[in-house]
Each structure stands twice: as structure tokens, then as C-alpha cells.
Image (cartoon, rainbow, N blue to C red):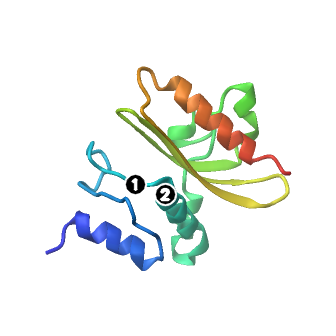
Amino acid sequence: MAGVQDLLPAALREHGIDTSGLRVLDASGMAPGNRVTAATLARAVDTLLTEPRFGPYGRGLPVAGGTGTLAERFDDPAEQPARGVARAKTGTLLDVVALSGYVQREDGAVLVYAVVLNGVTGHTARAKDRVDRTVAELTRSR
């Protein structure tokens, strides 16, 4: 019987998602040796939004400054534009701070993103603020 190390990459490839650089050691994503690229994360979010059967999952991601793991985030003035319009899944482990999701900009465009900071040392609050400011910038129409 195949384990998660085989099943997860196969499921991603089934949806046309490149798994180069992917290393799966556990189903939770908590193992220190797990690896995934920002591109793979972004394509997975895009699949949540573009494949109708996954729609509830995409719409169910936490809302910036409102629900779940994002309820207490996007609280600084520079992060405010993303409140209520960005949805994402967090990924904070050991020395990594990541946020993968999507925003609907003022002009109606939907942008999918994955921001990953590796090598974070010490307290993660500053890294989270940088990620949140980056996402806030994505909400602005150009």
C-alpha cells in the first residue's frame, strides 16, 4: 500500500501541479525534512479556485484579520488593505514563515500567491508582518 510520500505527489501531478523539489515525509507537513516550493503551493491554491469540486475549500480558507489563523494578523496600518479580502493558509514551522492564498483586488482581479521566508530566526512576528505587508500590496489595483 502506498504511503503519503507517494499519494500526495501523485494527487498534485494529477492536477497538473509540478512537484519538482517536493519532499513529503508526513501527512501533516510538520516533519523538518518536508520540502515544497512556493510555485507548488501557489498552483495548489489556484487548483482550489479553478476546479469546481474544490471551491468550498478555497472559499473556506481563513480571512485576513477575520478568521482562523489569520484572525490576529493584518493588524498594522500597512497591512490593513488585505483585511477581509485576502484568504490564506499559514505555514509557520521552526525557521519558516509562509502564507499561501489569494486576494481579490479592488479592480476585481484575483491573484494567487505563496510567500515563503526560510531561515527565520528568533521571534516570528517580524517575519509575519513582512509577509502580511507583501500580501496587502497585492490587493492594490495597478
| Residue type of the residue flagged with mark 2 | Leu
Q: Alpha-carbon neighbours of circle 1 within 10 Å: few (<14), some, or many (≥20)?
A: some
| Disc marking residue 41 | 2
Quarter that holds the N terminus = bottom left
Q: Tell me the residue at 57%/36% (across/down).
A: 71
Residue at the spot x=48%, y=76% of the render? Answer: 16
- Residue 72 in view: no
User: Label 1 amino acid?
Assistant: Val
| Residue closer to the observer: 52 or 7 | 7
Q: Position of residue 141 (x, y in %)?
A: 84, 51
Give the mark nearer the N terminus: 2 vs 1.
Answer: 1
Q: Is residue 78 above or below residue 15?
A: above
Residue in the picture at 28% in, 71% down = 7
Which residue bears the numbered disc 1?
A: 36
Q: Is residue 69 left or right of residue 20?
A: right
- The answer to whether mark 2 and mark 1 are in CB contact below 8 A is yes
Name the quadrant containing residue 30.
Answer: top left
> Which type of secondary structure does the marked residue at label 1 adopt?
loop
Number of numbered discs: 2
Q: Nearer the viewer, residue 89 or 18?
A: 18
- x 33%, y 74%: residue: 10
Left or right placement of residue 127 versus residue 7 in this view:
right
Point out residue 64 in the picture as x, y percentages from the top left corner: 63, 42
User: What is the C-alpha distance between the residues marked 2 and 1?
Assistant: 7 Å
Residue 126, x across and y down, in percent: 55, 24
Specify the farthest residue to the left. 1
Against 84, is 80 above or below? above
